[in-house]
Amino acid sequence: MKQEIIISGFGGQGVMFAGTLLCHAAMKEGKFVTSFPSYGAEIRGGIANCQVIISDEPIGAPVVYSPGVLIALNEPSFEKFSSRVKKGGFILANTSLYKPAKLSGIKIFEIPANEIAEKSGSILSVNIVMLGSLIAKTKLLKLESVINSIPEVLTDKKKPLWEPNKKALKAGFSYKPA
């Protein structure tokens, strides 16, 4: 098994945190991982992305050219990376911010992530809602591995964010897009 993923959004949407959390949980399950972050020119507000590879075998290079999965937290991210998703892959689109165009050979799952995050207790957890949806769709990792990684990735200094992120992860995991 090898899954290549691009997570993309505006700087400040937690793209790097989502990638780090995903990698940490995969390592807990004994998988090989790489993470290749890329920040937009303006950092906060520019388009940031994190390329993640999770595999049962050693990984040769960290760069993702044709991901099987794209998490697009906003429309500019969808526009920039959707053409790179390989046929048969899928996109998790944050339809709270945009309506994704249809693509041939690519399944698009519409996730109203902002609303789900808000109902879960924190609008800042949109990235984690999408991560929960990713886990549900791919069965790539156990939900418990990701939940248990939250306190390990978010240090004690950020302890108040543990429970809202756990709730958001579970809410994204439970959401059933059309």
Image (cartoon, helix red, strand yellow):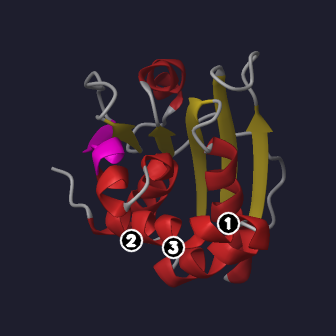
59 with respect to 175 (left or right): right
Of badges 1 and 2, nearer the viewer stands: 2
Residue at 65% over, 30% down? 11
Q: Residue at x 48, y 53 (%)?
A: 125
Residue 107 in the magenta stretch? The answer is yes
Identify the amino acid type marked 3.
Glu
Q: Examine the rendering and report whether any part of residue 56 can be seen.
A: no
62 to 120, vertically: above or below: above
Q: Give whichever of discs 2 and 3 has the lower sequence position.
A: 3
Q: CA distance from mark 2 to mark 3?
A: 11 Å
Q: Tell me the magenta residue range.
A: 106-115
Q: Which residue is mark 3?
A: 163
Which is in the foreground here, disc 2 or disc 3?
Answer: 3
Between 23 and 129, the residue placed more toward the observer is 129
Residue 55 disc label: 1
Q: Mark 1 or mark 3: name the one nearer the start of the chain.
A: 1
Give the image location of residue 168, x and y in percent. 42, 63
Crowding at dot 1, Cα within 10 Å, few <14 / some 14-19 / many 20+, comes out as some
Image coordinates of residue 21 in percent, x first then y, are: 66, 63
Q: Badge 2 local density, few (<14 within 10 Å), some, or many (20+)?
A: many
For the point 76% across and 16% down, the residue is 41
- Residue 65, percent across and down? 66, 33
Q: Quadrant of residue 138?
A: bottom left
Q: Is residue 84 above or below residue 16?
A: above
Residue type, label 2: Lys
Measure the C-alpha gap from mark 1 to mark 3: 29 Å
Q: Which mark is residue 170?
A: 2
- Three-letter code, disc 1: Ser
Rendered image quadrant of residue 1: bottom right
N-term-proximal mark, 1 vs 2:
1
Helix, strand or loop at mark 3: helix
